[in-house]
Amino acid sequence: MTVKIVTDSLGDIPSEVAEELGITVIPLNVLFGEGIYRDGVDLTTEQFYQKLIKSKVLPTTQIPSLGVFVQTYDELAEETQEILVIANSHKLSASYEAMVQAVGQMKRQCRVEVIDSQWVLMAQGLIVIAAARAAKSGASLDELMALTRKNIPRTDARMVLDTLNYLEEGGRIGKARAFLGSRLKVTPILGIRDGEAFPFAREHSRARAIDHLYDFATSFTHIDEMAVEHATTPDEAEMLAKRLKAKFPKTHIYRSMVSPVIGAHVGPRVLGVAVLGDRG
Amino acid sequence: MGQTKSINGQDLREMFAAATTWLEKSSADIDALNVFPVPDGDTGTNMLLTMRSTIEEAQQATDHSISGVSQAMAKGALVGARGNSGVILSQIFSGLSQSLADKESITGKELADALTRASTVAYAGLSNPVEGTILTVIREAAEAAKAHAATVSDDVVLVVEATVNAAKESVANTPTLLPVLMEAGVVDAGGQGLYTILEGALHYLKGEMEQLKLRRPWMVASSVPLTAKAPQMVGVEEVPYGYCTNFVIKGEGLNPDKLRKRLEKRGESVIVVGDDSVVRVHIHTLDPGDVVSYVVPLGTLHQISIRNMDEQHRDFIEMQKERMPAVEVAIVAVVVGEGLSNVFASLGATFIVPGGQTMNPSTKNLLQAVDLVASEKVIILPNNKNIVLTANQVQSLTQKTIEVVPTTTIPQGVAALLAFDYEADMETNAQNMNKAKAAVKSIEVTRAVRSTRLGGLDIKKKQAIGFLDGDLVAVGDKPDAVVQDVLTRVKLDEAEVITIYYGADTTSAEAEQIVAAINEQHSQLQVEVVQGGQPHYNYIVSVE
């Protein structure tokens, strides 16, 4: 029996990929004024960013109630005896905590293991995709856990932000606070270290910041999985993906959009690259 | 959301119990905000301990009316209060209980009145109330509660919601009222603590128990951006903070107002609250023995706590370091002009040594800076041709490891600094910075000090002269025209960003004219104007 793979919507896995690989994605919620939207379900990424740019109130995000996680597990338990749940970084949201708590409240008998991916965005997504592929070809839950734990430190990501305001406002600035207060208009390039935002570099122009993403991706010598994602700048993402494809013609480059939940914290015009692979 | 017309004693106890749980989740974050009155990093912890004592007492209350519960809470807060914010918090509970006396349950309007009373009592406990603190937050929150109850709705939940919203806004605004917060780029810790408590109470009233369990309190972001302070050349003389001294006096015929006046001569941040039988004292003093001896004859002393704030301050500094990326490598930059110094500081230079073209720092100046920074590895950015050699000499005079990135202009220095990578080691950083500095073109425009002939150009005294990467290439009467002249010698089609730093004697209006001229011909360029404030140079321009 195949192990079922569950994750949350912060992994930005495109729905067709999730469907193909049998990944169950639990949507997180976005609160915009009075409205509550399920990430990627009630509100498309495009609609969200249009609202974000126009709205004076900043959106906040929340995880769904515990019952949603419990129900998801119980439903899957009808088809399988083993579930692997891969959460986004517990330092960035309470998903992991809820995913673990939900295991104890299940009605059905099923072995469920929860792993903190320590990532969000497609970095989390690539780890989940790798696990789902292995599950499809018959790997056991123990093998999948070992694989996932091995893949977490092999994953890395960078994103170009337009501004740090959203991150600061939302209280998720982490060590990227070092880049606050710049008297020059600079484009920050962030990544994640130890589960929270980390300031890697800054460039004086967006074009050069995008070059930085390219240099980052091409610093890998072996690539298992790669993804390019954006929020409101499809052309830039397209250009970057093309450049990377020219450099790595054999690699499939996943294309995705930054989910509203993360979008609420990083703001529009975010552009990112995630790689699961090895360097040097 | 259902209508909640009134709340009783049990509601009051439960909502503040929930608030305590909520506060607990962010007490460490609140500790990290703490810069006023002493940056000792314990505000969140102190408020939490005060709340715990408040709730313990409330749970033991035998009178379950809102009057009885609030009296118990006030008592618990008073005996359990710790630190500045804790004592002020105890005053807030004292004010609430005064207003709620003899009541079984209350409406939204009565709650608003009680908050107003709480605000008045909080202010009364201090001889010098400071705005931009928890005091401002309780006052503005109470005002909002009152306005809401009077004009919109008497519903308790809605009144508390208006209170919480106002508190949040008030917290965000604290840096504009209290300069020390502005400098540190943080909001007031006590204010954040109070906001968190009110928000926790609101979650309870709305029945959001799962939120309380799974979510974390929001840390309010400062409404003003962080302004990094240029590091001082000379270390500020260290003033000791002394001892944070807290105790409760129990006796008869005590007079809190009189005692406060007496204690003010013996220390700072004095708070004396209570009644004629129980008084709580909080004071920062260099001699706690003197304070204790003074109060011993007044009654019996309880819960005496004396903490060394200098030690706390050191721990706080350590804690702050953990919140920033670990920087193994420090950067010492030579810069003159307030605007330029701010630019370098805001981009992460650890230490600014004042100096430039007509003011070359000595090797000793640079050595002092290198010795003062905490890191064992130091990168020096001389930012001037004449200072590179001086900088190179520092290595032979110090045990620390020095790398000089030989920047000869301000634009090169900025480009190098931008390339600094918090994760990389010193060698990699030096390489990256050298590479970055090479990619920038520098234009400097100044006035000739005497008439001369240089580089094939006839120059009259006081004419504007323009340099491109250190070479004299243009002369003219007007500095802005010379900037544009030099710009024609740079391949602007390949450039992306131009930054214009205008000097102390130049207006921003003139600089903006250059921007307009550039935009007319090269619309693809991102042009930024920054007040550099540098002497002698009308313009320093970087082209990248």
Image (spheres, grey):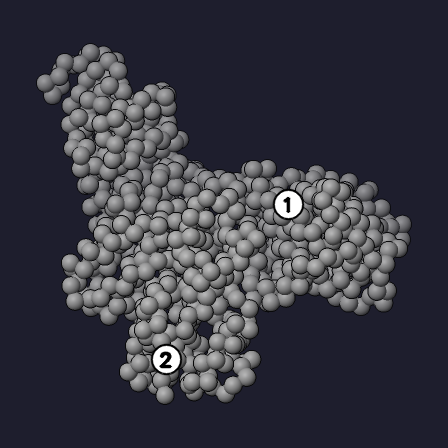
Q: CA distance from mark 1 to mark 2?
A: 47 Å
Q: Where is the C terminus of chain B found, in terms of image quarters?
A: top left
Left/right placement of residue B96 relative to residue B186 reads right
Look at the numbered disc 1 and give the secondary structure of its residue: helix
Residue lying farthest to the left in this orientation: B456
Return the residue at label 1: B166
Which subunit holds the residue at mark 2?
Answer: A
Judging from the image, mark 1 belongs to the subunit labelled B
The one nearer the camera, B269 or A98, is: A98
State the residue at coordinates (21%, 37%): B495
Mark linked to residue B194: none
Return the mark for residue A145. Answer: 2
Q: How many marks?
A: 2
Question: Which residue is depicted at the point 59% across and 64% down?
Answer: B211
- Provide residue B62's location: percent of width, then percent of height: 85, 67
Q: What residue appears at the point 53 percent right and 81 percent down from the top-left corner?
A: A106
Which x, y percent locates residue A16? Answer: 33, 68
Residue B516 in the image: state x and y as whole percent: 30, 25
| Mark 1: amino acid | Ala
Determine whether B389 is above or below A242 in the image: above
Q: Is residue B250 left or right of residue B468?
A: right
Residues packed near mark 2 inside 10 Å, few (<14), some (14 to 19) or many (20 plus):
some
Circles 1 and 2 on the same chain: no
Q: Nearer the viewer, residue B498 or B526?
A: B526
Instruction: Answer left or right for B81 relative to A83.
Output: right
Tell me whether the residue at label 1 lies in contact with that at label 2, contact meaning CB atoms closer than 8 angstroms.
Answer: no
Amino acid type, label 2: Met
Query: From the viewer's perspective, is residue B385 above or below residue B1?
Result: above
Quadrant holding the N terminus of chain B: bottom right
Closer to us: B58 or B381: B58
